[in-house]
Image (cartoon, coloured by chain):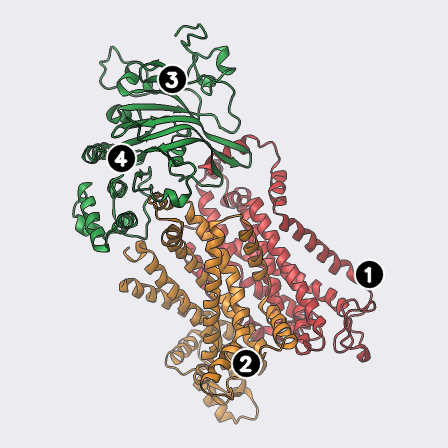
Chain colours: A orange, B red, C green
Amino acid sequence: MSQYVLRRLLIAIPSLLGISAVLFFVLALAPGDPFSELATNPNVPPEVQAALRARFGLDDPIYLRYLHWLFAMAHGDWGFSFVSRMDVDRLILQRLPATLYVIGSAQVLALLIAIPVGVYAATKPYSLFDQIANTLAFIGFSLPTFFTGLLFILIFSVTLDWLPFVYTTDIKATGIHYVLEMIRQAIMPVAVLGLFQAASMTRFVRSAMLDVIRLDYVTTARAKGLGQAKVIVKHVMRNAMIPVVTLIALQMPAVFGGALVTEQIFRIPGIGSLLISSILSNDTPVVMAVTFVFACLVVLFNLIADVLYGWLDPRISLR
Amino acid sequence: MAGLTLASPSAERGVYSPWRETWRRYSRHKLAVVSAVLLLVLILAVVFGPFIWRVKINDIDIVAGLQGPSLTHPFGTDDLGQDILARMIYGGRISLAVGLAAMLVSVFIGTLIGALAGMSRGALGHGLMWLTDLFLSLPALPLLLMLIYLFRDALKAMFGPEGGIFILIVLVIGGLRWMPVARLVRAQFLSIREKEFVEAARALGASPVRQVVKHILPNALGPVIIAGTIDVAAAIIAESTLSFLGLGFPPDTPTWGRLLFDAKDFLDIGPHWALFPGGAIFIAVVAINFIGDGLRDALDARRVI
Amino acid sequence: MAPLLEIKGLKTHFSTDDGILQAVDGVDITINKGETLCVVGESGCGKTVTAMSILKLIAMPPGRIAAGEIIFEGRDLVPLTSSQLDEIRAKEIGFIFQEPMTSLNPVLTVGEQIAESLRRHENVTRKQALERTIEMLKLVQIPNAEGRVHNYPHQFSGGMRQRVMIAMALACKPKLIIADEPTTALDVTIQAQILDLLQDMKERFGMAVMLITHAMGVVAETAQRVVVMYAGKVVEEAGVDALFADPRHPYTQGLIRSIPRIDLDSEHKTRLEAIGGSVPILINPPVGCRFAPRCKFAMNVCTAKEPLLREIAPGHRMACHLGDPQLGGAA
């Protein structure tokens, strides 16, 4: 098993390198050399300009610049945000927890909805429950997160005045009230993202269950007199989860997209809203680094999915 | 058991033409039929709407600002008193056009890469599939934002503010969504390549290009059409998301996403402003997705359930 | 003595887009305690559906038991719910399936899959279940049973997996084993081993076996009594010796003539015969005898009137108009 994890880790490295290369070359191809903004600013004295050019290696051939940049990134030298007046890595570390908190809770919520609904719908295909669940799932992933977010604000904040629609990091409360307030303000963003995720996950779970439920070994399990619940959970679900893990991992880029929008709507100070504000203020080092962090997170989740896959399917890890 | 015995009687009864059979299977999906009608209405509305609803999109009338739906303004007005219906008709043209154009881009790139990967058995095929997997794990929206941030000004200078952004958005959305099509096309290639009729064509000396165009691509058409349909919906969402984040079309171009962006600070006093464009995006997307689902029933013979 | 299992007038139907598929249409089968009964027929003739109907292992819907009784030890199984049947499944009636490659759950160890049956039906601890499982694996001659019990199905060969399936079916010592083409998917050399093992186990535990097969060679080797099915119906039933010595139904005769014989010397060798055509689709079955379209001896009455099972000798029944005294024809 540990050997399998190691192998997967080694496979993740080329994809990270590939992604970093894509990002870097896109940046390098962009007109007007965004890195050199300071270097071409007339208010900056020429000798400082030259020093900056040398520091960024702007006059080197492109592959050298890429290696240089990669080396700096690997050393934790992610550049300096001139807008926030702090190191990019510190800025991102400050913002990351909020993003992970919202995304993580949303994933948990999505799983809590998708697994029971998808499993139950698959045990009674084409029943009324199945049809309703299916239609709702379809509507769910056709509703863009920015619209659901606005609808939620309209209903729960503006009309009913139940929940706050602005997320804040400095809550004026302590102890249990602080925790409650943290939960209360996260309800809407987590629900928006979680329901969106749950919609597609429900469909994955249902179709994976239907694929497994008609297999021979399920009949074998029935012939043992195990009872419907046990057959479904132990024999069908356990096997159906294997493809579902992969599909969920493939969804991760979309999840981060949804998280970005959600952060913007509810003004959550995560890395998504940081990306938007950096774009609006031309803060290139931050734009670059946040995009790379998103890419790393996707690779990380793929890695987790691979490990789960190996754990769920004995045929993989032993090969 | 039942599934096996099912196939033969309907095959024997196959007096229908393929198109009628396709339509028969599509029409069994009621929501897909309703969606097709709905989408058609939407398309007709944005294409012919301006000839019937002749209100200008930028007639400012501050006094009549933020009014709810009425006879003079069926969808109400925004904070500057501009007619939301007229703006939505204009924006709908852009949203639907972006969706279609981006789909064409992604289907084109995907078919090309999938076909190349499917034909070559060597390093090229492996390399292209690695690239496909790499693109699948790129965080699309952040990358989309970054690309637009980097190239916006250059294209604006070349093609004007609206045209430049249109080209950029279409290329970038299409360029980040070709992977499913590439995988489908490649899978079709691998399964069809060894089939008898392609072998026969090869034996008869058909050139590789001819084999691909005449024999393999038509067979890959079904899954690609389905994926393309879903791509239109995804591209509409992507464009709306960009506009909603304030990073899509210029502020005075009222795409549906941009309308929502402008409306979001007036939710308490003018909810209609957000509800109509949001509803339009939702209807367009859900209709296209249901059509894709109906097409899956109709075209994908392998799908049993 | 009352029979162990008595199937009376069983009809199992499947609803399809094109109509009702009458997969099993009025089947009577009796199995006595401790005997081996073979059910033979081509694929698609309803053997498997009949067997699966006994414990309601067919998919419902679209499947449905439309009529009939299935009496096991004096109790009708048809009206029972699935959870009531769970008490009989594996405990009283064990099942061995055709495809050892797909009939075992790939993500559970074989030991777990055998033990779960024991733990469901017998009051045993986890440890006792494991011990019994190892014992069963030894019984079906799996080498190094103590180690193999923790292996997954993909680590076994096809023949070994079928041994595991047999161990699983036997674990709770059922009174009846239903084996659905247990050797079809296996290599010829392995087939004989599995049949021998099955015979061994039957003698050791004294259970009855219902063996479903399409291979007449298997029938000749294992059966005491034989039921021949065609298109959802029983067409002939006899003791194994009587059936091979004096097959009466043209379909049975065809089946027997299609066996390659190596025991005959070259003078007696004839060309191997095949039955032309194939089993009809049972959505709108032909009126009269369902075999008539493929039958060399078909008469006018065959396409008009359905032949019923009748006793032609003690313990020998068949359904064919040929030689029916009431029709005045000659065999």
Which class describes the residues within 10 Å of circle 2: few (<14), some (14-19), or many (20+)?
A: many
Q: Amino acid at mark 3?
A: Met
Measured in 3D between alpha carbons, the distance from the residue under mark 4 to the one under mark 3, in whole angstroms, is: 34 Å
Query: Can you tell which quarter of the image residue B81 is in?
Result: bottom right
Residue denoted by label 2: A167
Measured in 3D between alpha carbons, the distance from the residue under mark 2 to the one under mark 3, in whole angstroms, is: 82 Å
**Mark in the foreground, 1 or 2:** 2
Nearest to N terminus: mark 4 or mark 3? 4
Which label was assigned to residue B2? none
Helix, strand or loop at disc 2? loop
Residue denoted by label 3: C318
Which class describes the residues within 10 Å of circle 1: few (<14), some (14-19), or many (20+)?
A: few
Q: Nearer the viewer, residue B177 or A218?
A: A218
Q: Determine the residue positioned at 56% across, 93% down.
A: A43
- In this picture, residue C27 sits left or right of residue B93: left
Residue denoted by label 4: C187
Measured in 3D between alpha carbons, the distance from the residue under mark 1 to the one under mark 4, in whole angstroms, is: 76 Å
**Mark in the foreground, 4 or 3:** 3
Task: State which chain disc 3 sits on.
Answer: C
Q: Are marks 1 and 3 on the same chain?
A: no
Task: State which chain disc 4 sits on.
Answer: C
Q: Amino acid at mark 1?
A: Ile
Helix, strand or loop at disc 4? loop
4 and 3 marks in contact (CB < 8 Å): no
Question: Is residue A46 among what the camera can see?
Answer: yes
